[in-house]
Image: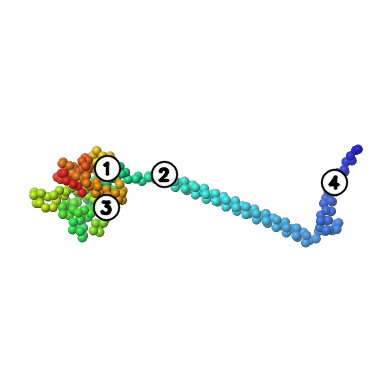
Amino acid sequence: MAVMNQPTKSAIDLLQEAILDLEARLNLQPGEAIPEQLLVASSSSAAITTTAKDSNDTSKKANNNNHHQNNKNKNNNQKKHKQQQQQQKQQPQKAANNNDQPDICKLEFKVGVITKVWVHPTADKLYCEEIDVGEEAGPRQIASGLRPHFTLEQMLGQRLLVASNLKAKNLVGFKSHGMVLCAARPKDNDDGGGGEVVEFVEPPEGAAIGEVITYEGLPTPEPFTPSGVDKKKIWPTAAQGMKTTDDCCAAWNGHVFMTRAGPCKTKTIAGFAMR
């Protein structure tokens, strides 16, 4: 059986059908104008839809901005943390005190010279000194119980050795930042008897101010911090071995105190303790 082709609807027919359908939906008679209230409602609905869309777009944009800012802050924090880690790596690490070295190597002695000296105002046996040991901070202030043994004139300009990594101590109200090294022996009949003779341990003439003392036959010293010297009681332990040799050289258990210019010595005291 043959199939009949349906006639094709024109654009006008389709438009007419749409108008009739809209009139039926709005309960309008054919050709009746659309009431004004329906037009206003339709316009408001469109405006609300547009406003909601704009609000959503604004909120979305704000969220995107916040997300971008958060990412930027996170990246900045990560960069700052990385820079801090790099700076910490670049900073020299403070070495721990080397306990395996000889006790004398845990102390630090420097070549110095007395640039100023005065009598302690209240202590009968103390001199107050300023001693140049080659430090950028300037001379150290040190108190020494040497008034019974030296005049002010003998003290001024004296070259000597300073124990420079001792913890600062208050001596009768004067803060002393180190100690000068001397040797002592009892007075004999030639000295008039009674008391003792005290002499400085002196560096050789060519030794530079600030040079750190080494010890013949021992490794290069790795001095402890002042707090480490104090806590471990290094000074009294090391002092037991400090004694001048038969030729007046300063030594620790026979290891002579050395500068690049030669050994450190007393003028006449041989075979006695240093302090």
**Furthest-right residue in this view:** 1
Q: What's the CA distance linking mark 3 and mark 1?
A: 24 Å
Closer to the camera in the image, 153 or 66: 66
Q: Are marks 4 and 3 in contact (CB under 8 Å)?
A: no
| Residue 23: x %, y % from top left | 83, 56
| Residue 135: x %, y % from top left | 29, 48
| Residue 9: x %, y % from top left | 85, 46
Q: Which residue is mark 1?
A: 102
Label 3 packing within 10 angstroms: few (<14), some (14-19), many (20+)? many
Q: Is residue 138 visible?
A: no
Per the image, label 1 sits on a secondary structure element best described as loop
Q: Which residue is mark 4?
A: 10
Q: Report the mark closest to the observer, 1 or 2.
A: 1
Mark drawn on residue 72: none
Q: What's the CA distance linking mark 4 and mark 1?
A: 114 Å
Q: Are marks 3 and 1 in contact (CB under 8 Å)?
A: no
Q: Are marks 4 and 2 in contact (CB under 8 Å)?
A: no
Q: Residue at x 67, y 56 (%)?
A: 52
Q: Is residue 255 visible?
A: yes
Callout 1 amino acid: Pro
Q: Are marks 2 and 3 in contact (CB under 8 Å)?
A: no
Callout 4 amino acid: Ser
Q: Position of 130 compared to 56: left or right?
A: left
Number of numbered discs? 4
Q: Residue at x 44, y 47 (%)?
A: 84
